[in-house]
Image: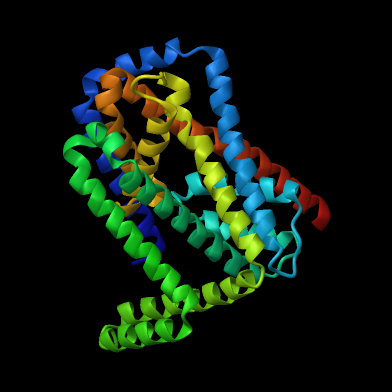
Amino acid sequence: MTIKKKTWLKIAIVVLILVILVVFFRDSFLEGFQEIAKVPGKTVVLLLCLSMGYFLAEGGVITVMAQSCEGRVSFRSGFACALYCSFFRLVTFGSGSGVAEVYYLNKKGMKAAEATGMSLVQYLIQKITICVMGAVSFFVCFRYVEQYIGEYQRYIALAVLITMAIGAGILLITVFEKGKNLLFFYLKKATERKANWNQRVKKVEEQADILQDGAKKLYHKKHCLFLAFFLNLAKYFFWFLTPYVLYGDEERLTLLVSLVLMALATMAAGVIPTPSGYGSLDAMLILLFHPLLGDAKVVSLVILYRVVVSLFPFLVGMVVAAWSLRKEKKMEG
């Protein structure tokens, strides 16, 4: 499948999910925008600060992980890199953020191969973080949130198991070289008569090799690994506060409920094959928060959450990308 076809397929999937949401909640969209109009200005400012908090933590992750490589990245550059990637994430529907990170870090002096390995390991840690948050939320807080997830608890449980299996599989490939070699040996053997599939398997194997090389460097600096994990917890904590900041109380939508339901929604959305969770995360937010908020407020929550995690970072990232391009042109001139 060509890049153009993949892009159009991603767009089609996102549009389909959004159309389904609009059909089911068409009568609530106007009320949702009316709810947004009621949100105080100071709350909007706080939400935007939480959005930047995420990228400050993400910048910290990039800075910490760069310590395992020869290249050194300042916190300022790490923060700018996180925003730079957010711009390309929305423009490319998720597929270009990794490439953008490698390009940006390469311009800062890091070797392309090291930046690629670091980016893949960063993705791995992010997946593990979501897996841990979702699993802990489901198993430890199950009785507490059972009344909120209701009839969806079986599907959420399935999503937990799938996410844990994916995380364990990626971790297994990363840590055990023999296991990785054995897996790809059988995959290549099974696809040897299908040239397209065989080529894809070889490309994935190349990425797995890069991932292992990057992971080995990081494993020698375990303090970087643990710090990156805790910074990942912190960055999701900033975003997961959004429902509580908007409509939280001390009876139903408490701080814990907000964090737990957001963790479950994010983890479950990751199982659905959509680019960067566009559409799938919105659907999961509606399903899990609707019993607590009702039609109008849940629609406003989804819209404002998209502003916090996608639109606002995109706009700030666009400024960073333009500034970076301007500097490059000056250096070339």
Residue 74 as seen in the image, left or right of residue 41:
right
Q: Residue at x 41, y 18 (%)?
A: 249
What number of labels is visible?
Answer: 0
Quadrant (top left, top right, bottom left, bottom right) of the C terminus = bottom right
Q: Position of residue 118 (x, y in %)?
A: 60, 65
Q: Residue at x 31, y 83 (%)?
A: 187
Residue 55 as seen in the image, left or right of residue 277:
right
Which of the 4 quarters of the picture holds residue 50? Answer: top right
**Between 313 and 1, the one nearer to me in the picture:** 313
Q: Position of residue 281 (x, y in %)?
A: 35, 41
Please indicate, yes or no, whether residue 278 appears anywhere in the rendered image.
Answer: no
| Residue found at the far left of this picture | 151
Q: Position of residue 49 (x, y in %)?
A: 60, 29
In the rendered view, would you say 105 is above or below 77? Answer: below
Q: Residue at x 48, y 31 (%)?
A: 241
Quadrant (top left, top right, bottom left, bottom right) of the N terminus = bottom left
Which of the 4 quarters of the picture holds residue 247? Answer: top left
In the rendered view, would you say 284 is above or below 254? Answer: below
**Between 261 and 33, the one nearer to me in the picture:** 261
Residue 242 as seen in the image, left or right of residue 168:
right
What coloring was used for the rendering? Answer: rainbow
**Between 255 and 127, the one nearer to me in the picture:** 255
Q: Residue at x 29, y 48 (%)?
A: 13
In the rendered view, would you say 313 is above or below 290? Answer: below
Which of the 4 quarters of the picture holds residue 303? Answer: top left
Please indicate, yes or no, whether residue 186 appears anywhere in the rendered image.
Answer: yes
